[in-house]
Amino acid sequence: MDTIRKHDAAAANKGNGTKPGRPDPLDLLGLDALLTEEERGVRGEVRRFVGEKISPNIQEWFERAIFPKEIVPEMGRLGVLGMHLSGYGCAGKSAVEYGLACMELEAGDSGLRTFVSVQGSLAMSAIHKFGSEEQKQEWLPRMAKGEAIGCFGLTEPTAGSDPASMKTFARKDGDDWILNGSKRWIGLASLADVAVVWAGTDDGIRGFLVPTSSPGFTARNIEPKLSMRASVQCDLTFEDIRLPASAMLPKAEGLKGPFACLNEARYGIIWGAMGAARDCYECALEYAKQREQFGRPIAGFQLTQQKLVNMMLEIQKGTMVALHVGRMKDAGVLRPEHVSFGKLNNVREAINIAREARTILGGNGVTLEYPMLRHANNLESVRTYEGTDEVHTLILGNAITGIPAFR
């Protein structure tokens, strides 16, 4: 079922001071009126791309566990790779515009939004924030075009929520570095041309740009998976990889470097999760109006309406959270706990919406013809990566009490 819907007619009646004849069931509060024309334009371009390139193919990609690498240059031409970065061929869009793009991409599938996030918010962001001018010139223009793919190696088999305990280590050997260790759940690694790898050194944690063609670099796809099947996650091993001094990211010291990149990715998730939730809600709403039982559409039954109303409420609230966080980011006043607020709330609610939407479809909802359980499965991964519920809860707990409770 095609759940991509255009809002042009409804948007025309918003914010003009008149009482509309009937509220938009996808935007009851008229949140479109809070967006600029340029922001709606970016959203429309990405929505069309999703409708033409992702939605018709996602069932097959998910079922066969295929990441469509051929779509990467098309995403580059769309301008969504590193779109919130400036210079070096990047689009230089606002945080809100980037968020809207993430929302539309994840309405298609979390795996495709994850690709854009790993490429732009993690790998490209690390190079853009902390790289030398030579590193930026070498990688960012090609990555923005989709001609080169990057990955971001932080998580390890025994160091997930506690990255300070990482065992990957780079030791000095003359002017070179010798890298050894392992990483796990690294998106895109088997497709990547360059890996941003975080490793301990005698001077603390540092970041390195590691070409994936380097002798001693191995990436193995993690299979089989029940989630993110249209995406790629890998185990990485580094065995005596020799890197020149120029491989180090010169402006990143300690965990502040990777955490700054993680917050970029977490921000996109705040919007993306609402895209997945909206896709489930829209499909359930249309299905409920068409499916008849006991001589009437099931949308006319009170319990079904209660489910749909609860979904709509949380999507509208989550979208307002995303938009407010985006405005704060564009204003330069965003704090990490604001990102944790959005990530924790919106992903948690999106999973609930996906599951509840499935119940409206009954048995039909467990098939890949409909998006609910595909989104629900994907969102289990989204809930875990870039900080678990528990980690974001403790970040917020620290923010409101002033007492850290991580240990």
Image (spheres, rainbow, N blue to C red):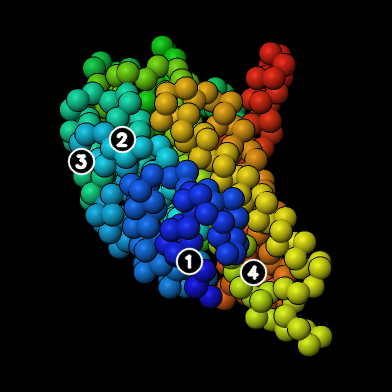
Q: Where is residue 161 in the image (x, y as percent from the top left)?
A: 60, 31
Identify residue type, mark 4: Leu
Residue visible at 23% across and 17% down in the picture: 175
In terms of depth relative to the viewer, which is nearer, 137 or 288? 288
First in sequence: mark 4 vs mark 2: 2
> Which numbered disc, 1 or 2, marks the residue closer to the eye?
1
Disc 3 secondary structure class: loop
Residue ID for mark 1 = 5
Q: Disc 2 versus disc 3: distance between alpha carbons?
A: 9 Å
Residue ID for mark 2 = 85
Q: Position of residue 385 (x, y in %)?
A: 56, 41
Residue reaching furthest bottom? 295
26 lies above or below 211: below
Disc 1 secondary structure class: loop
Residue ID for mark 4 = 285
First in sequence: mark 4 vs mark 3: 3
